[in-house]
Structures are given as C-alpha cells and as structure tokens.
Image (cartoon, rainbow, N blue to C red):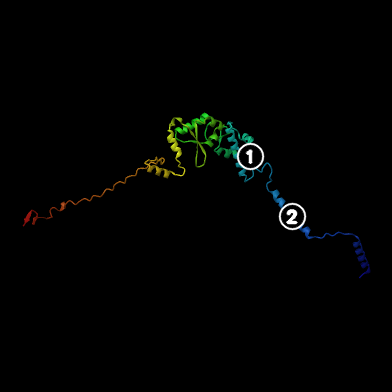
Amino acid sequence: MDPALLREREAFKKKALATPTVEKKKTKDDSQFKDDSKKKSKSSSSVSAGPKLDATNYKTMVGSSSYRFGVLARIVRHMRARHQEGDDHPLTLDEVLDETNQLDVGNKVKQWLQSEALQNNPKIECTQDGKYIFKPVYKIKDKKSLLRLLKQQDLKGLGGILLEDVQESLPHCERALKSLAQEILYITRPTDKKKILFYNDKTATLDVDDEFVKLWRATAVDAMDDAKIEEYLEKQGIKSMQDHGPRKPIAPKRKKAAQKRRQFKKPRDNEHLADVLETYEDNTLTQKGVSIK
C-alpha cells in the first residue's frame, strides 16, 4: 500500500477522534413515551371533534327529555301556587319563565313548551291572546261559590267532592272552610283515607230518641260483614234493605214466528173417473145404471 495514503488515513483518524460527538441511543422508555403521546393526541382530537358542552347548549342537547319535563313541572307548580294565593291574571311564557327563574332555557325547550307541552297540559289553560293561566278542577272563587257547588252536588245526587280538589281550586281555602264549618260534613273514605266534603242539609235532620242513639252506639259491628249482619236481621224477623245499583233494562226477547205447516190437498174422489168407477153397496154391483144381484 502507498505509504502516503496510510499517513493520510492515520491523520484522518486522529482528527476524528479529536472532535467530540454525541450519539443518541433509542431506548424502550422513549418508544413507550412516544406511543403514549400518540394515544393522548388521538383521544384529545376525538374529544375535540365532538360537541362542546357549555352553558348555552347543554340544556338543549339530544336526550334532555327529563330536563324538559322538569321545567314543565316547575311551571305547573308555580301556576297552582299563584292560583291558590288569589293571583289569577294570565301570564306570557316569558313572564312564567321569569317568575320561575328559568330564563336560561334554550329556544328548543321554549318552542316545545309553547307549541305542545302547555297546550296539552290538563292543569294549564291557554287564553285567546296566547297567555297562560292555571286550570282548576272547579271554578270556585269564594265560600259562596263553594257552598253553591255543594248544594248542586246534593240536589243532583252526585255526592261529595274531594277536599284536595277544593284546596287546589279555591284560593285561601282554609279560611273559607273554617267559616263554613256548620254547612259542610267531612267523611273519610275508607279505601284511600281521603276526605270528602258533603253539603250539610239541615232540613233532613230528624230527632231521634236518646235510647235509640245509645243502642245504636252500643252495637259493635266492626267484626261483621254485610252478609252476617243481613243474616242476623233475618233471624230477628227484620228484612234488610238491599240496593243492587241501577239495573240495566233487559231487552225483550223476540218471539220466533211459528212455522206454518203445509196442508196437503186431499184428492177429490177421482171425479174425472166418474164414468168408469163401480160402486159396491150391500153386495150389489152397480155399473152404468145396471144393478146385478
């Protein structure tokens, strides 16, 4: 080999060793870190691609039916409370939302309330000018209208009315019921323990002897049903009054038309053979006017 080339090679090695260099080696930790960073970037990009949740649109997103009905229930409760306090002037939708502190509802919820929910709600009545008012069970405003309603129920035989319906319909109900304490009878229904109001018709009161009252109150029938009471009265010779309710009219049965029997015509003694037939009378043969004995 040429000695000049060898000398240049050795000089190049010395120069290369004299210059400092830094070599980066790939490690497993670096690769794992890069993989994790890639996964995080992908997840963040997928989250950012979805709808953003903020204070303006989270209430109007799909699947917020529970929120809608919550807004509606709050409106109905507020309108009932207004009516019970005697405040019965109608309100617009914006006024209702303002009084219920729900002005932050979205446009879709407002549209649903205005076009469907409030229109079809049995407790809300829509006026002709587009306002809303509470719709009670009975149209009563004071104690006089309540007493008039109870009298009509009694005269027509419709029975009483529920106390909770009166409390919902009549503003300042407790005050009116207290002033009408002598005109109203309270009966507790045994099935659901709800109180029912009846008109106290004093013209139907009868004076009963105290002895009968004592006997009535001393007789305990709590452990007996109606069948046992009726059986006991029959043994004592007392017939009990029975009420089976209104009976349905029985339709009269149609009588089947009697089938007419066919009448067969009897032969008329062979009149067309009168010239041919022979008659036997008393062992006598008669034929064509000639008698043979």
| Extreme residue toward the bottom, this view | 1
Q: In this orientation, which residue lies closer to the viewer: 55 or 10?
A: 55
Examine the image and state in which quarter residue 27 appears.
Answer: bottom right
What residue sits right under mark 2 in the picture? Answer: 38
Q: In this orientation, which residue lies closer to the viewer: 204 or 122?
A: 204
Whether residue 171 is visible to the viewer of this picture, yes or no, is no
Does residue 198 appear left or right of residue 52 in this picture? left
For badge 2, the amino acid type reads Lys
Does residue 96 appear left or right of residue 37 in this picture? left
Secondary structure category for the residue under label 1: helix
Q: In this orientation, which residue lies closer to the viewer: 119 or 197?
A: 197
Q: In this orientation, which residue lies closer to the viewer: 42 or 257?
A: 257
Does residue 98 appear left or right of residue 255 in this picture? right
Q: Position of residue 111 (x, y in %)?
A: 61, 39
For badge 1, the amino acid type reads Asn
Q: Position of residue 104 (x, y in %)?
A: 66, 38
Secondary structure category for the residue under label 2: helix
